[in-house]
Amino acid sequence: MIFWAEDIPAAPGRARGRLAPSPTGFLHLGNAWAFWMAWLDARSRGGECVLRFEDIDPARARPEYAEAVARDLAWLGLDWDYGPGAGNGKENPDIFLQSRRAARYRDALNFLRARGLVYPCYCTRKELRDIAGAPHVDDAGAPYPGTCRRLTDAEKKRLEAAGRSHSLRLLCPEKTPWRFTDALMGDREMTLEQCGGDFALRRSDGVFAYQLAVVVDDITMGVTTVVRGKDIQVSTPRQLYLYSLFGVTPPRYAHLPLVTDETGARLAKRHASLTLASLRDAGVWPETILGWLAAASGMRKEFAPLRAREAIKDFSFAAVGAENLRLPPDPAAFFLAAQR
Ligand code: GLU
Ligand code: ZN
């Protein structure tokens, strides 16, 4: 067994959700949707919320974004019991920053290593990209074919001597089906092979991988429900496998439909005008945005201004449709017109 030091004291019998933004840019409408749902799910069950910044990638995360994200979440009307500025845990705000939690991730990695489940992978990005023609699931990319699974010590030495750096991968049972009941999508079943095969726990530059960090964090923060976009669903079987190795009961999951632009494309960096900051600057109110999200998702019959807390009382995932939420062509103009 691994000893898990609690970062947030457990609250037995009480739901605890989390908002886990990556501070790599400004929040957009898709983030607003996912975080509002995570918050509503927790609050509607009388539960707590944790705000945690997934700033693990030093090349992409910036403290300015973390500040902007917290401001935007508060502007939407969301709050949190644990996290920067929440009062609780103020004595050690670092626990809410993945960039400060390497010691935790190292302990977990060492536990898996001691069980012989971790191996170095020397494949370059290019080699991995060239694994052509392989079938792949959304976002998981081509499945890793296990090239480095059986390298001999001599081969490893030769690769090291040639100056190759290595990531660390987890040995995965490829054919085992992982089942979970999604609060939104119902019963799901996927194998790890469908989700990309042996996945990385630490990158070749020493940065811990999202999969490991998120599971360690959710365990040590006592998170009981994970609500996030369905684009991350391929990560769930990997995370379930980690929970099983750690001997911890996994949280309940809900994977949400996504917000798209008028062409059906998922929101990304290029949709700069759809950040909450730019909509706010244009004069759009948070109630307008939430009202639109509620109507577009099926939670409300009509598009009318709605405050974050007004949706707590009758919240249920059953009311949320499976279809993505498609924005009109000029969302800012559309929202402003609705406010007149
Ligand atoms: N940090 C991720 C994101 O902002 C969320 C990961 C998760 O919810 O597990 O997309
Ligand atoms: Zn490899």
Image (cartoon, grey):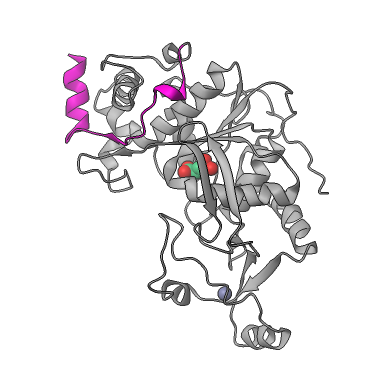
In the image, taking residue 75 as reference, residue 88 lies left or right, namely: right
In front of the other: 254 or 259: 254
| Residue 48 in which image quadrant | top right
Number of numbered discs on residues: 0
Image point (75%, 28%), residue name = 9
Residue 258 in the image, given as x and y percentages of width and height: 36, 38
Taking the magenta stretch, the answer to whether it contains residue 134 is no
Image point (29%, 19%), residue name = 288
For the C terminus, the image quarter is top left
| Residue 248 in which image quadrant | top right
Residue 203 in the image, given as x and y percentages of width and height: 58, 64
Image point (34%, 32%), residue name = 277
Observer able to see residue 145? yes
Q: Compared with residue 250, is residue 159 higher up or lower down, i.e. above or below?
A: below
Taking the magenta stretch, the answer to whether it contains residue 324 is yes
Observer able to see residue 99? no
In the image, taking residue 331 as reference, residue 144 lies left or right, namely: right
| Residue 333 in which image quadrant | top left
Which quarter of the rendered image does ligand 2 occupy?
Answer: bottom right
In front of the other: 184 or 19: 184
In the image, taking residue 314 as reference, residue 306 lies left or right, namely: left
Residue 323 in the image, given as x and y percentages of width and height: 32, 35
In front of the other: 144 or 50: 144
In the image, taking residue 209 as reference, residue 264 lies left or right, namely: left
What span is in magenta? 314-340
Residue 192 in the image, given as x and y percentages of width and height: 56, 57
